[in-house]
Image: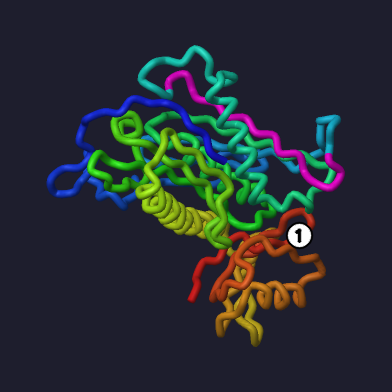
Amino acid sequence: MWKKRNTKMSNLELLSDQGLRLDGRRPNELRHIKCKLGVFEQHDGSAYLEQGNTKVLAAVYGPHQAHSKRVDFNEVVINCQYSMATFSTAERKKRPRGDRKSQEITLYLRQSLKAAIRTELYPRSQIDVYVEVLQADGANYAVALNAATLALVDAGICLKEFVIACTASLSKNNVPLMDVSHFEEVSGGPTLTVASLPLSNKIAFMEMSQRFHLEHLPKVLEHALNGCRKIKAVMEKAVRKHLMQMGSVGDWTTPEGKWTILTAESVVFTCCPPAPLERLVSIFNSFSNKRIAISAGLGITATEAVLVCTRPYFSVVGTLCTR
């Protein structure tokens, strides 16, 4: 999806003579990322994500019985709500939600999440996703989507794979910049926001603030996609850390590999030698009386994968080690 909006260009230099940005990063570097899953016990799933100075909370309820009368009996209803805290920007907001921009981002979040969720597994159901920006410093939609993805994983929602977003821009001297801050958004050139499914190499959403010259668009797009891949690696580590912190309650070894039970709902399987994920699912199915739903990485060769039980499915939510 493409959306154009007019913004003013600035003559400010975003890169120093040494090729560094104003915050000390190189053009292809992400801001520092800090994330945590399971921050609220009363929610089915929750996550907190910091990307630079942009800070977002996400919470998930469901799946539960759909409240909407216009329910598709074959798919789940995804209800999203995006809001910004009144103190999230330098100017205090009078309306934390319901303004035009928040409604647009809510629509974009629903579109991107629907591309990642196995909607056919939850017929006549509804999943509620609430996202609030606590501090806004650029790439608000991208950070909100990444936090929502982590919250869905924490809730055990079956995903095809992670959906990750990143914003890239173009400096005055036509150098692409990855993961831009608010100052770079308003002071630099046009920005491009991309939500991608990295494993399948698909784009779920795309928005650009201004027109790009055809010569520059491919390199800015590639910078955004590379940013998505880097963010995915950070998020996968956070998911693994969260599962490990939940505590291991047992393990056993089979000819196919080692199984470690973390909780009643999660298992880590280390395969030796590496095998396609379809094979991992087949192996896991032989030790379980529950049906398997592949959630990520079809055809990817893996040495380790996380399998999470999701009412009543087991799903591969992420490949941890690949060869």
Q: Is residue 289 left or right of residue 5?
A: right
The quadrant in which residue 44 appears is top right
The quadrant in which residue 279 appears is bottom right
Q: Position of residue 226 (x, y in %)?
A: 41, 56
Against 290, is 149 above or below? above
Q: Give the image's coloring scheme.
A: rainbow
The front one of 233 and 70 is: 70
In the rendered image, which quarter contains the N terminus?
top right
Question: Can residue 228 be found in the magenta stretch?
Answer: no
Residue kind at label 1, given as amino acid type = Tyr
- Residue beneath the point at 50% across and 39% down: 207
- Residue beneath the point at 58% across and 48% down: 204
The front one of 297 and 254 is: 297
According to the picture, the residue beneath numbered tag 1 turns out to be 313
SS type, badge 1:
strand
Q: Which residues are magenta?
A: 72-87
The front one of 244 and 127 is: 127
